Image (spheres, rainbow, N blue to C red):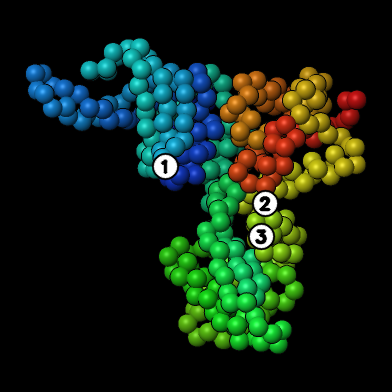
Amino acid sequence: MKILKKELKHGKVVVQAQSLDDLWCLSQTVSKGDTVAGKTTRKVKLGSAEEAVKKTYFLTIATEDVKFEEQALRISGKTTEPNEDIPKGAHHTITIEPGDALTVIKERWQKYQLDRLDQATQEQLKALIVVFDRETALIARLKTRGYEVITELKGKVRRKDYDTSTATNFYKEIIAYAKDYDERNKPDKIILASPAFWKEELLNELKSDPKAGTLKNKIVLATCSSVSENAIDEVLKRPEMDTVLATAMAAKEMKLVDEMMTEIARDGKVAYGLKEVEGAIEAAAVEKLLISDVTVYKNQSSEQLMKKVEDTGGKVFIINSENAAGQKLDALGGMAALLRYRTS
């Protein structure tokens, strides 16, 4: 994400999306009632010609609906001023794709909204995570928000406990995949995680490969208890990953939700569920508000609640519902608050 202009006294921010992650970020930032402006293409008939031609317009609309789908951001609403063939008040959709610029005008920008844009402008860690044992490997890539499982590799089942040839061949298969991924995507780090000592065995296999090149310098080892998506979440929370994953949003979200779960387990300074959280916000007791992006989208009152939290000195964290952290939060009603003091 590039921020091209920021005029907060006029409520205006102009951004340029660089990736699909940026489009997702904007889908969570633009709200109903915002004014947005951008280029759009529309088919129009010129004169008496039967065939329509495509024309590009720069339109300004009052937002009524925002959708992130089919690798594009679609913002629908009514035009706020006439523009050539398009009258004021006409329904229209502005479609934003990576590389496009968008002007967003809000009556008031909240801190959590500006923070979200700032985070999107920061260089994010590009990492490949491989959780594996001698027979299975689950491979995922870190995204700006969360991670995406790319593939699962299956090795041949060992015939005997002392048969190491099968394991060695499977390690070579994992290494071949990692080398190919490294050449195509140039990740900053490749995290190898396994139960027991398998990660060390694979690393030794990698070091003996004369074609491994700079791949060896990107390797970080971690421990996990299984080979599953839960293991990826486990890796993101490991203490030894704190420095490596300092810029990874998924790890930060996981730690916040874990902090919340710890407070719940000890019956500590926490509130969860809409009714309890609303009460804590009214009492100005909220230090950190955790709210899932699904809740932000579905609950019309969430925007006002987030504003109240910031107005009383609290911080707002929007958690991705696609990941384990967001799923835990959604299971508790979609929002929770870490409190300055107990309210009941």
Q: Which residue is mark 1?
A: 71
- Vertical arrangement, residue 130 with respect to residue 312, above or below: below
Real-space Cα separation, disc 1 to disc 2, in angstroms: 25 Å
Give the residue type that dot 3 points to.
Answer: Ser
Q: Residues within 10 Å of mark 1 (few under 14, many from 20)?
A: some
Disc nearer the start of the sequence (3/1): 1
Q: Are the residues at dot 3 and dot 1 in contact (C-beta closer than 8 Å)?
A: no
User: Foreground: 117 or 20?
Assistant: 20
Along the line of sight, the residue nearer the viewer: 253 or 307: 253
Mark 3 — residue?
Answer: 228
Which of the 4 image quarters holds residue 4? Answer: top left
Q: Residue flagged by tag 1: what amino acid is it?
A: Gln
Q: Tell me the residue at 49%/79% (across/down).
A: 213
Asked if the residue at tag 3 contacts the one at tag 2, i.e. Cβ–Cβ closer than 8 Å, the answer is no
Task: Give the x, y percent position of residue 143.
Answer: 55, 51
Q: Which mark is residue 251?
A: 2
Q: Tell which tag, 1 or 2, sits nearer the viewer.
A: 1
Cα distance in 3D space between marks 2 and 3: 17 Å
